[in-house]
Amino acid sequence: MVKQKKVKSPLVSVNIPTFNSEKTLGKTIEAVKNQTYENIEILIVDSHSKDKTLEIAKKHKCKIVICEGGLLEARIGGAEESKGEYVLLLDSDQILDPETVAKSVEAMKNKDCLWLYERAYNRNKWLPSLYDADRILVQEYMKEGKDLSVVLPRFFKRTLLIKVFKNIPKDAIPLCSAQDHIITTYEIKKLAGRIGFVGDKEKPGVQHMEPDNILKLIKKQHRWGQVTREFHKTGFYSELISMKHKYRKFDGRNLSLSIRSFILRSLRGAPYFAGFWFGK
């Protein structure tokens, strides 16, 4: 009898950009290590953190890549250093469901990339519950094909992701931070027609540790406003940036979600536009 060779599962590279991420990174890495899928490498792409971020990464035996630029540069650098057939773009404050990678590898048999259904990890608190409502509303739009610009697909064939990043103008990359979602999605849609998703409202593929007090929200949004203004000056993707400034449309079928989304975007809008127009 001829013995059949065991087919090895494809390697998945999980890329996590970091900057002073010590408060959340441990949970993020532990969730990756708790996946039911085993063939995974973890890359921490760090922009010179001054806290214990790198200590945490070393403790968990992650591969460390040093990045000199912003968020988009970190994503590009991580993809270039990845060895996997697939790349999962994760943030340092996100928690994967234990079955997300396994389900994603299976789904990729007939897809080019996937977005992961996302909810707020700490949605039992008031402010994160607003983020949670906004995410659910956006993802319902996405399922209906109404809005594919505001949520970044996260699971890719590495070869496709590299092609996508090469299509982004080089001069736009160093200043791109808050805009990486819409720009990456915009470029993906030019090359990939088969975009799928993993997870649902009851069992999300990933959960996000959202700001849980107003001061954190204000600081974060003011910073995003500042970096968006600097990127806007480049003239690249200006129409996409304008789209990002719009409120969600009210959905009569999801009135409660729409109201909470409106409250959140009102709270986020003031510090964001203060940073955009007046921040230094």
Image (spheres, rainbow, N blue to C red):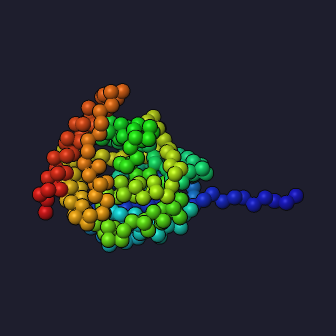
Quadrant assignment, res 188: bottom left
Whether residue 194 appears in this view of the structure is: yes
Q: Is residue 55 visible?
A: no
Please state the horizontal and vertical placement of residue 93, each as a whole percent of the image.
35, 52
Q: Quadrant of residue 259?
A: top left
Residue 82's spot in the image, x, y percent?
A: 49, 67
- Total labels drawn: 0
Look at the picture and state if 128 lies above or below 52: above
In this rendering, would 9 be left or right of 75? right
Indicate the quadrant containing the C terminus: top left, top right, bottom left or bottom right: bottom left
Q: Residue at 17% of width from left, 51% of height from top?
A: 273
Where's residue 163, x and y in %? 48, 65
Task: Identify which residue is drawn at 26% across, 64% down.
Answer: 235
Residue furthest out toward the right:
1
- In screen coordinates, is 38 left or right of 90? right
Viewport quadrant of the N terminus: bottom right
Q: Residue at x 32, y 67 (%)?
A: 172
Q: Residue furthest left?
A: 278
Q: Is residue 215 left or right of residue 205?
A: left
Q: Position of residue 241 (x, y in %)?
A: 28, 54
Height in image: 250 above or below 278?
Answer: above
Which residue corresponds to the image point at 85% horizontal and 60% vertical from the top-left? 2
The one of 237 and 136 positioned closer to us in this rendering: 237
